[in-house]
Image: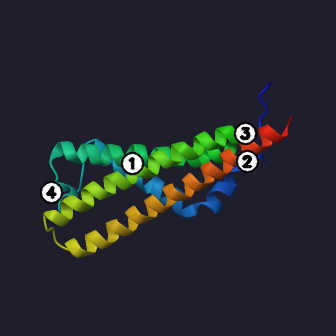
């Protein structure tokens, strides 16, 4: 039986910026803040000073790759007219948000356990960002399930 592709409308890229401004901004900030950490640069008196050098680099890599994957998934989803590729784009974005949430969790936990100045505020702020990343991941998981169901029904009803 030949495979049929379920085609959805291709959206212009500016629709992406209007439909997902929070996700794009946070992912962009993760990429931008991950670059100096990966290269070993940080400001004096920054919270990154309390981390060992290798953990700073790991944190930067997680932020950079997680943010980049999130942006890549968002862009691919909006630029791809084929539903199967959109599912792949959603999975890429999911991977990015989990990496960002992991980076935030590790760094927030370390700052909290080291009892850095303002540890309560750090815990609250990082918990809110982690919750936002996990909620986005769960939303994307529901979208993947819905797309998969639609494709399955489309292919099965095409006979």
Q: Position of residue 128 (x, y in %)?
A: 38, 69
Total marks in image: 4
Quadrant (top left/top right/bottom left/bottom right) for the N terminus: top right
Q: Return the disc, 3 or 2, that comes first in the chain's sequence.
A: 3
Image side of residue 5 versus residue 84, left or right: right
Badge 4 marks a residue whose secondary structure is: helix
Q: Which residue is mark 1?
A: 99
The answer to whether mark 3 and mark 2 are in CB contact below 8 A is: no
Image mark for residue 150? 2
Q: What residue is at 58 percent from the left and 49 percent from the top?
A: 74
State the quadrant of the C terminus.
Answer: top right
* Distance from the alpha carbon under mark 3 to that under mark 1: 26 Å
Left or right: 153 as drawn, with respect to 148: right
Report the mark closest to the observer, 3 or 4.
3
Mark 3 secondary-structure assignment: loop
Q: Which residue is mark 3?
A: 82
Disc nearer the start of the sequence (4/1): 4
Residue 85: give x, y in percent of width and height: 65, 38
Indicate the colouring scheme. rainbow
| In the displayed structure image, the side of residue 61 where residue 41 appears, left or right | left
Distance from Cα at disc 2 to Cα at disc 1:
28 Å
Q: Which residue is mark 4?
A: 50
Can residue 108 be seen here? The reply is: yes
Contact flag, marks 2 and 1 (Cβ < 8 Å): no
Using the numbered discs, state the Cα–Cα distance from disc 4 to disc 1 in whole angstroms.
Answer: 21 Å
Distance between mark 3 and mark 4 Cα atoms:
47 Å
């Amino acid at each position: 039986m030949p495979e049929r592709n379920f085609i959805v409308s291709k959206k212009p890229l500016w629709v992406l910026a209007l439909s997902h401004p929070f996700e794009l901004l946070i992912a962009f900030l993760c990429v931008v803040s991950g670059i100096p950490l990966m290269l070993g640069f940080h400001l004096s008196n920054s919270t990154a000073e309390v981390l060992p050098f290798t953990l700073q680099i790991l944190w930067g890599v997680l932020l950079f790759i997680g943010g980049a994957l999130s942006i890549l998934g968002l862009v691919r989803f909006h630029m791809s007219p084929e539903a199967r590729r959109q599912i792949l784009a959603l999975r890429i974005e999911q991977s990015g948000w989990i990496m960002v949430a992991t980076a935030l969790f590790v760094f927030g936990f370390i700052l909290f356990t080291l009892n850095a100045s303002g540890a309560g505020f750090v815990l609250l702020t990082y918990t809110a960002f982690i919750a936002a990343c996990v909620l986005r991941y769960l939303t994307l998981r529901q979208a993947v399930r819905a797309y998969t169901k639609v494709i399955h029904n489309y292919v099965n009803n095409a006979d």
